[in-house]
Amino acid sequence: MDERGPEPVEDATTDAARASAHPLRAAIIANPSKEGIDALRTAVGEAEARQGFAPSLWLDTTVEDPGKGQARQAVDEGVDLVIAAGGDGTIRSVAAGLRGTGVPLGLVPLGTGNLFARNLGIPVNDVADAVVLAFSGVEREVDVLVADIRRPEGDTETHVSLVMAGIGLDAAMIANTNPDLKKRVGWLAYVDAGLRAIPASKPFRVHYRVDTGRVHRPRASSILVANLGYLPGNIELIPDAEIDDGQLDVVVLQPRNLIGWLFVWRKVTWENRVLRKSAIGRQFMDLTGGSRRREVVYGRGREVVIRIEGAAEEFEIDGDEFGSVVSARFRADPRALIVRVEA
């Protein structure tokens, strides 16, 4: 005789009923100064209805807090998804607030550079498509770059980067970008700033070490530490960069003269983008000496320590100026952020 009694009766409530009783909810953190907010609200409303989400929590960024505090507020309120709508600065700040929380981040690019979104294949010219992807895309765990910097006065700060941070000419170029031109032509304004900055640039002595390796002391125009390697304008600065490998990529630009800058340009627009992707192209690089030139030097590791010899140099993160620094320590935070992307 079976003394276990009757099998328990399963709750007949369907998954759909459970979902309707406790619908998912998103938070939209938007930069109110950007164009496209009305289109964003319309697209979000349509996505909520289509995906069965409750009305979203809307939080505006401010000059004092461009997104980090709002992201933490959204997490505290128990949302299931956070969507950052704005430029690279907004997305980076929201990501800093979500880092390590397990709450996924959706991206709606409303800026000019949109570096992180471009590297992940997020639509950068269609708000509605980006919103659809934010609500329904697959989740991918990605690394975050953490930078501990020291200012000339001795103050220390910690920032996060999603794409790359740089010291030297690239940062000076960003600092000198015409804001009005940037609004009109987007990332092309950086080209204008670069053409103006290169003739006046002076190499500086930098000491850097990757992981526990030896200290290098080149005279460089720029040193960049990156999580991703693609830039607008078909520039593939770091062709082997991976966003989820737990590694940072280091790039040292050290041209000696204008001819050297032409070799840098050839490297990032032709060799990296085209030649190295095929066996024939790599053979051509070997025959022409492209693989042996030293204008662009690469390294890779989990940690990069940099010290500037002499005066402080300009510093940038993800295309935004961040003042000047005398030293910096970069480290990878592996798979610390979850992002909604295409399957």
Image (cartoon, rainbow, N blue to C red):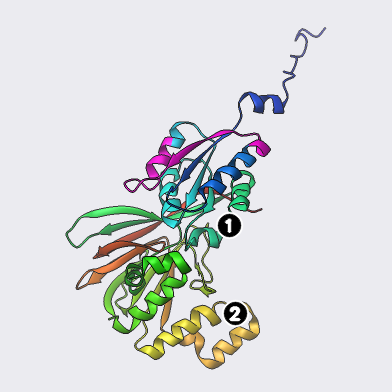
Which residues lie in the magenta part? Answer: 49-73
Give the quarter of the image for residue 311.
bottom left
Label 2 packing within 10 angstroms: few (<14), some (14-19), many (20+): some
Q: Which residue is mark 1?
A: 122
Give the quarter of the image for residue 215.
bottom left
Q: CA distance from mark 1 to mark 2?
A: 23 Å
Q: What is the number of callouts on the image?
A: 2
Q: Which mark is residue 274?
A: 2
User: In the rendered image, is residue 276 in sight?
Assistant: yes
Q: Secondary structure at mark 1?
A: loop
Q: Magenta stretch: residue 60 in it?
A: yes
Rendered view: 49 above or below 189: above
Which percent across, then down, holds residue 266?
50, 84
Q: Magenta stretch: residue 161 in it?
A: no
Q: Is residue 242 left or right of residue 312?
A: right
Amino acid type at mark 1: Ile
Which percent across, then down, holds residue 260?
40, 88
